Image (cartoon, rainbow, N blue to C red):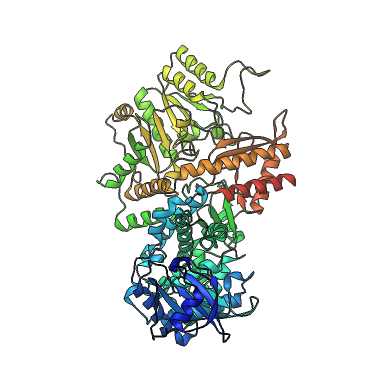
Amino acid sequence: MTLPGADNVPASEIASDIYGIEATASPLPSERDQNFLLLTTAGDRLVLKISNPAEDRRFLEAQNAAMTHLAATRLCSRVMRTKHGDDIGLVNGRFVRLLTWLPGRPLGTLATKSDILLEDLGGRIGELSLALSTFDHPAIHRQFHWDLAQAGSVVAEHGARIPDPELRGLVRRVAEHVAARDGSALSRVRRSALHGDLNDFNVLVDGEDDAGRVAGVIDFGDMVHSYAVAEVAIAVAYAVLDHDDPLAAAAAIVRGYHGVRRLTDDDVAVLFGLVQLRLCASVAIAAHQQPQRPADEYLSISQQPIRRTLPLLAGIHPDAAEENLRQACGLEIAHGVSRIPASVTLARRRASLGRNLSVGYREPVKIVRGWMQYLFDETGRRYLDAYNNVPHVGHAHPHVTRAITRQLRAVNTNTRYLHDNVWLLAERLTARLPEPLRICFFVNSGSEANELALRLARAHTRQRDLIVLDFAYHGNTTTMVDISPYKFNGPGGRGAPEWVHVAPIPDAYRGSRPGEEGAPARSPADAVGEIVDRLRDRRMGLAGFIAETYPSVGGQIVPPSGYLEQVYAHVRRGGGVCIADEVQTGLGRIGTDFCAFQAQGVVPDVLVLGKPMGNGYPLAAVITTEAIAASFDNGMEFFSTFGGSTVSCAAGLAVLDVLEREELQAHALRVGDRLLESLRSLMYSHSIVGDVRGSGLFLGVELVKDRSTREPATATAGAVVEALREEGILIGIEGPFHNILKIRPPMPFNLADADLVAATLDSVLAGS
């Protein structure tokens, strides 16, 4: 056996010359060094390690010292001395060491890992960690890319090299989340000497199946002085790969560790985040190294399992994970969730709240937690949230949560006092918008924002009348109900006020289309022009036109190309102001653009942004031109107590941070295109699917009894939504006939989620 890196000196010759041992040699896998199994003539097994040419002798001395320090634990090899009594030999400029052979097979070769084995693993790691807590060496105090304390920087430096955009986005998001959630606790955890790489191929077990025990650990080449809890976190990260229940596996290891070396509250708080961070760093480092060493299979040994497991871990609520680990350690759970049954909650709610306060589903869901694109009920069951757009960048996003908490600790006050948050948010929003949208007003909700937009239009035009789209919904205040056909033409409504004029919705599937047999000659845009002309003929003025750019309640409608361009021209010809209600579609949801009006090639006079701006914290905005803002400045003060508050603006700034850092607009387009394609394929196997439409993560599936007549399948749509809920997927229903499945999830919704929704819907439709 020869060594190309050591001037072709055979390994067996090195063993003889340096150590006086006659043996045959065979290679062992390694990332950096060259390792050989030596079989001596006496039948003994030893490991010859020939170091990378760049290796620092002091670090090899540190490894040897650590193994000597750990001798009492019997967890690692002993260091064999050279013929001259040295721990380290030298051959042609390469450092050489000889270690005793540890029997056993790598943990990573086991098909399954029992809880007994995993708990034993935790206990042995606890022994190792406890022993290393009294060891130190100057050489392990180093900058090292595998150090978990450096993982955030590693992802930032190399994450862009991850070729798969979906995985790249996930790795970046998880790293950001861990930094935002655990940063404070990480500054307090204990530090110690670490083995640093207890992956499942560096842990040896005895026996031939998962009934065995941990026999030892190998390869101290990643030793570092860092977070003590990182030792067990690294072991968990690799042991749970492809495990059916990764959280249960983690709990078994942590239980064993805690039984030997007690974990502190801060340790447990950061442990689950460090597990994920290790896998993120592994993906980023592999993306950096593999192009340089494409033939090195060792670099990719864990990458496919990580691709499968990291999304599962990212879908676990970190509070639930922490509670699980605390329970495994027998520690008090400080912040549990309500375990009151849903039936009790529903009864108490009905007794104390208005009867027309709606609740979803025949069997209501009690939600006690949310995490990114997932919701969790009181039993811990997870639901994929494909419905709620308010938590725009994800339920409980740690960056947004931290921003709100920090600002609440500082001050929460209003715009009568100077504070930088409000103008910073205004500048960042308008920087994403075309001219002349430059002046911002901040309020609490979409309803309040649309009220203000109407006031702006009336102040600027000095007119009252308004054009709206049929089936539109713009809010729950008295005036917004007056301009919302969905409300005033629905149950309990009293019809349109005399100053509200309703135009047809631009529904390309169900609406009127010029040239189609039996269809009127006018288009939906021409209908707006006719209203403008009728008002002019009656010598009545026009305040403006308000519409959701992509009508949501009206049926997840994507207007035909050129529609808004024609409508805006008609409205402006009549002296009116064009208001774009982008509560549902703003902030990158449609994927192609920051706001949907940009996809239509128009610029409104007034833009309304709502719910998603604060990710659940009350915040909305009205953005307009300097001319319209000047008209509104008529002597009457405008003030909203909480509009533009320091905390709401902190939330808005954090949402913009996340949108940019996690590239969620591009993500929405990529995932939405995948889901659109999958949903449209259902039209070939299910005749009930009449139309599939949308853009990005704003999608609709229209169900019909007959494609030729387009008769709505209202009852079936309701049954499908209930069936999806039973399968753990939450979506909504929209449209004039309540037959359109509405898919409008939080923006972290990913490709796997898209595939799950399409596959489950396929199954549900097959059984309907």
Q: How many marks?
A: 0
In the displayed structure, does residue 69 sit left or right of residue 206?
Answer: left
**The quadrant where residue 609 appears:** top left
Expressed as whole percent of the image width and height from the top left, the position of residue 622 reads 38, 36
Expressed as whole percent of the image width and height from the top left, the position of residue 260 reads 48, 82
> Farthest residue toward the left?
418
Expressed as whole percent of the image width and height from the top left, the position of residue 2 reads 51, 69
In this orientation, which residue lies closer to the viewer: 284 or 275?
A: 284
In this orientation, which residue lies closer to the viewer: 57 or 399?
A: 57
Using the image, determine if residue 410 lies above or below residue 652: below
Residue 535 visible to the viewer = yes
Q: Residue at x 60, y 38 (%)?
A: 700
In this orientation, which residue lies closer to the viewer: 455 or 528?
A: 528
Using the image, determine if residue 417 lies above or below residue 687: below
In the displayed structure, does residue 720 sit left or right of residue 143?
Answer: right
Q: Residue at x 34, y 57 (%)?
A: 406
Using the image, determine if residue 642 lies above or below residue 691: below
In the displayed structure, does residue 180 sit left or right of residue 517?
Answer: left
Q: Residue at x 41, y 33 (%)?
A: 607
Question: The C terminus is located in which quarter?
Answer: top right
Expressed as whole percent of the image width and height from the top left, the position of residue 171 reads 47, 55
